[in-house]
Amino acid sequence: MSTTTVRPVSDSAPGRGTAGGTSFLTATRLVAEREIKSFLQLKSFWIGLAVTVAALFAFSVLPSVFGGGQSSVAVVGTEVQAALDQLDVETVEAEDVAAAEELVRSEEVDAAVVPDTTGESATGVRVVALSDPPAEIVAGLGTVPPVDLLETADVSSGERAAVVMVLAVLFLMFGMGGVAIAQSTVTEKQTRVVEILVSTVPVRALLAGKIVGHTLLTIGQVLVVAIAGPIALRAGGHGDLLTAVLPALGWFVPFMILGFLLLAALWAVTGSLVSRQEDLGATMGLAMMLVMGPYFAVMFFSDNETVLTVLSFVPFSAAVAMPVRMFTGEAAVWEALASLGGLAVAAALVVMLGARLYSGALLQTRGKVALSAAWSHAD
C-alpha cells in the first residue's frame, strides 16, 4: 500500500525550536490547552470521574451498611460454647487450644474462643485472632476478655488487600486513560487536520502538548481521588485505615504522574502508526500489555515480598508496587526515592524515543506505518 508523506515545517529553521513563527514552548502550551479544553467539554470525562469517586464511597461505606456476613469462631469446650450462645456466629469445635489456633492461622475461622487458664479474664475465656481483634465477638462477650494476636503487624491482611486493589485499579483506570491520546492522534490523521497543524506547530511540540495536556488532566483526577479517598474512609468509619493509607496516597500521586507520563508517549506513538480509528486496535497491544501487566502482577504477587520488591523497581509496575510497599512498611524512604528516580529517567527516555517515532509516523496518512519506517522518516 502506498504511503503519502507530508513534509512538516522544520522544527529548527528559521530559528531553532520554531515552526511557522511559533516557538516550541508556545506551541506546546497551545496544544495542551486545546487538549484540556476539548476533554473538559466531554460529558464522558465528568461521568467517569464521578463514577470513580462514587465507587470509592461505595467501597468504603457499603460493607459497614450491609455487614460482612456471619463470623466463624473456633471453640474449645462446652463452657466456651455456652458463652457464645447469644452471638450470631458459626462455631467450629476444636479439640484443644493448639487446634483452635491452627484454624485461625489457616484462616478457616475468623477467630477462636478458648478457656482462660491464667485467671486474667472475668468471663473465663480468651479470644485468639490472627492480626486484628474481632470487635463483634469481643463486644458480644460482655466483659472484654483478653485478646491474643497470633501475628502482630502494623497493617492487617484485609487492609493490605484493600489498598493493593484500590491502587492497582486506579493505575489501570488512569493508564487506560491514555487511549484518549491515541484516539485524538488518529482523528487528526484521519481528518487530515494534522497537515494543517504541522504547518504552524513543530511535530514534537504537538506530541509534547498532548502529553502535557493529558498529564495535567490525570494529575487533576488523581488529586480528586486523593482528596475523596480519605473522606470516603472517614464516612465508612475506617479511621485507623485512613491513618495507615495516607502515606501510600502521598507516594502514589508522584508515582502515578510519572507512570502516566511514561505510558502517554507510548499511546501517542500507537495512534500515529495508523490512519483510521478502525485500525487502532492493531497497534495497541504493547501499550495495553504495559498497562494491564502491572495491574495483574501486583494483584497476583501482593503477598510475595520478593516479587513485589522487584516489581517496585521496574518502571512500568513501580507506580503501584512501591506505594504498596511503603504502605505496608516493607520499603525504606531511600528505596522509594530510588524507584521514583528510575521511573523519571525511564519516562524521559521513552518520551524521547516516542518523539522520534511519532514525528516519523504522524504525516504518513495512508495505512499502517511500520516502526522501522517511522524511525527512518523521522527528522
Image (spheres, helix red, strand yellow):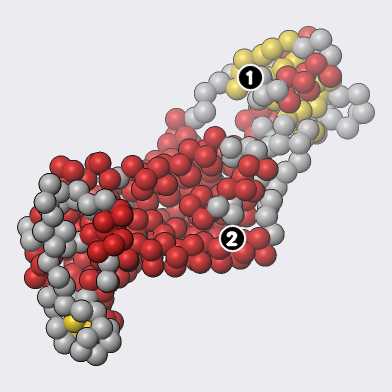
- Vertical position of residue 174 compared to residue 95: above or below: below
Question: Residue at left 34%, top 62%?
Answer: 354
Question: Residue at left 62%, top 30%?
Answer: 136
**Mark 1 — residue?**
72
Classify mark 2: helix, strand or loop: helix
- Image coordinates for residue 95, horizontal then vertical, percent: 81, 10
- Image coordinates for residue 50, horizontal then vertical, percent: 29, 50
Task: Looking at this view, name the residue that lies furthest to the bottom.
Answer: 15
Residue 308 falls left or right of residue 363: right
Residue 253 in view in this figure:
no
Amino acid found under the numbered disc labelled 2: Ser
Residue 375's quadrant in the figure? bottom left
Nearer to us of marks 1 and 2 is 2
Residue 221 falls left or right of residue 188: right
Q: Which mark is residue 339?
A: 2
Viewer-closest of 70 and 141: 70
Residue 60 falls left or right of residue 187: right
Amino acid found under the numbered disc labelled 1: Ser
- Image coordinates for residue 28, horizontal then vertical, percent: 26, 76
Viewer-closest of 58 and 347: 347
Disc 1 and disc 2: Cα gap in Å? Answer: 42 Å
- Vertical position of residue 147 compared to residue 339: above or below: above
Question: Residue at left 25%, top 64%?
Answer: 377
